[in-house]
Image (spheres, rainbow, N blue to C red):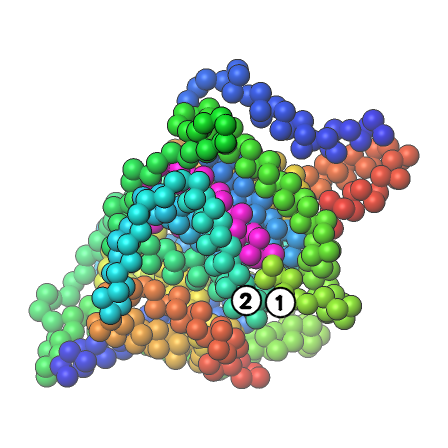
Amino acid sequence: MTQALQHLLNTLVLGGTYALLGIGLTLIFGIMNVVNFTHGALYTFGAYAAYLACAALGLDFFLALPVAILAGLALGALIELVLLRPLRGSDMDTTMLVMIGAGIILQSGTLWIFGGVAKAIPTPFPDAPLQIGPVSLSWLRVFVFAAALALIAVTYGLINGTRLGRAMRASFQDADTAALMGVNVGFIYTATFAIGSALAAAAGALLGPVYVVFPQMGDLAAVKAFAIVILGGLGSISGATIGGFILALAEEFGAGYVSSGYRDAMGFLIIIAVLLVKPTGLFARAERIG
Amino acid sequence: MTRHLPLSHLPLALLVVLALLPLGLSDPYLLNALIQTGIFTIGAMSLNLLLGYTGQLSLGHIAFFGIGAYASALTALGFDVELLFGWRVVHEPWPPLAGFVLAVLIAGATGYLVGRLSFRVRGAYFVIVTISFAEVVRLVALNWVELTQGPLALTGIPAMRLGLPGLGEMIFRTKVQNYYLVLAVAALSYLVVARFTRSRFGRAMRGLKENEALALSVGVNATRTLTIAATASAAMAGAAGSLYAHYFRIVDPDVFLFSTTVTMVIMVVSGGKGTLIGPVVGGLIFGLLPVALRPVLAPEAQWIVYGAVLILILFLMPRGIVPKLEALAARRPRAAAAQKPVEAESRP
């Protein structure tokens, strides 16, 4: 019983960052119809940005997250302007392959610059965990969970409560009509890709201190993001949020009660099962954003 | 007519050059690179069957290659595993040729099953389901230690042997011997793809790629056609995997790496998807590019070049090198308009 409670608590903490990863990916797919294969590389990029901010620049640990988010925003905007904007209107396979090429460049570039040795991000939290009755949780994970929830709330607020969010939702429904109503769709696409990238970078900066930072860390994160997005239905933000927690639940209990070697297989099995049973995802509705 | 010679005779010319190459080449490093290139070019040709002719982008193609490698290795090495409920399966070592045949059959059967299941979805969903399949297979290879030795790899795989009646047995031990083996299988694969794409199925495949709704309306069975293409494609990838296993004599879960699929996709897309010779041209370029770059660049930097070249090709000649050359060749001689039907054959 205690063990199950501990797993449930771990699920909540992990699910928050997974949701963050999924929302970034689903936002880009929903609005731009681009399968973003750089998502994993952007996650890695965020983790390295946080590492650099802490270790090289000597910034405070809590400043590393905003640094990573800003860096993610900038890199995302750059990728959109240089690679995606010229390809607007070409088929999905082409953009997918270009994104794969960009992902390779980013990942190999990281490996080239930083080497393959894993880096650790030092944290100011005490070693003693937080005890809640029979279960315990490290303070770092408490912070990661709170930060992830805050970022998810900000994203919801951005999309549902601002002019930019309204323009994004309009572009999602019908880009041509939105353009006719005076929405600068080109800018919306850049903003969407930048925001999605920033969310991936934030997830990397949050999970970097929990695990370690290494160039291939994004591979698995990208797959998990795909699993979450497919689970929730491509383009659905609330679906991605719920999907993040479901994947965390499946991994946590699968690793705890079945076999830890197949922990990372859960995401793939979920993808295959969902696509075979209900390809539109579990939470797909007619209007899938917001 | 004569002005069209260069392109239409390219496959044969290439074969002759490649067949004569070992006569003047003894550098083992270069020979090794050529063998490896040949093996992955066969993989690229098999991928082209699906990506080029049906238009379905499978990013899990390496799964069939890896399944072929493991099937072939395990057939030749033998194994002893305990399944559920204490049911034991013991397999005594068989000759490598049986491994090759089984690799083709098992990879083909897997391709059939995956095709049956995953062709319910298209586009982004299909791409992601194929990636997931490959990763699940990789994790099984990594974790089912009793069968696959996990990360310790299957080692001591015997060299390919070919028993010829009356001629005794040929053993492919040296690099030159393996070079000719790979070249022969590659040439055979080329002929199989050529025959396959010119058949009724080939036309149905291209019909589906051009316009699925229209193809369906004239009676093409989409799922059946795509599944047959996936089966043939997977079987051929399995053959390449078997060659890999018996040449390198070691197979570990890293054969399933996503980056190898990406390499094969780059070979097909750069050479020209949906052309017969495209994957061979792309395969030679991208198989030998690391050799050319090795003295100049670190391996990580080589991958940066790979990524950049992929992006550049997609931007500058999205249909690939071979269609681009064909277009250039066709533009010059105006009288060669009569050649058009031939071109349409290789460029759907």
Q: In this view, does B143 lie to the left or right of B64?
A: left
Q: What residue type is labelled 2?
A: Arg
Q: Is residue B298 magenta?
A: no
Q: Can residue B293 be seen in this view?
A: no
Indicate the chain on which mark 2 is placed.
Answer: B
Quadrant hosting residue A185: bottom right
| Residue shown at 34% from the left, 77% from the top | A245
Q: Can residue A245 be seen in this view?
A: yes
| Residue shown at 47% from the left, 46% from the top | B101
Residues beneath discs 1 and 2 located on the same chain:
yes
Indicate the chain on which mark 1 is placed.
Answer: B
Instruction: Establish if A290 lies above or below A50.
Output: below
Q: Does the magenta stretch include residue B240?
A: yes
> Which residue was labeled with disc 1?
B223
Tell me the magenta residue range: B229-257
- Residues tagged 1 and 2 counted as in contact (Cβ below 8 A): yes
The x, y position of residue A167, in whole percent, is: 58, 76
| Residue shown at 46% from the left, 33% from the top | B163
Distance between mark 1 and mark 2 Cα atoms = 7 Å
SS assignment at label 1? helix
The x, y position of residue B207, in whole percent, is: 73, 60
> Which residue was labeled with disc 2?
B116
Q: What residue type is labelled 1?
A: Thr
Q: Residue furthest top?
A: B24
Quadrant of the drawing holding the N terminus of chain A: bottom left
**Is tag 1's residue or tag 2's residue first in the polypeptide sequence?**
2
Dominant SS in magenta: helix
The x, y position of residue A149, in whole percent, is: 32, 77
Pick the residue in front: A254 or B140: B140
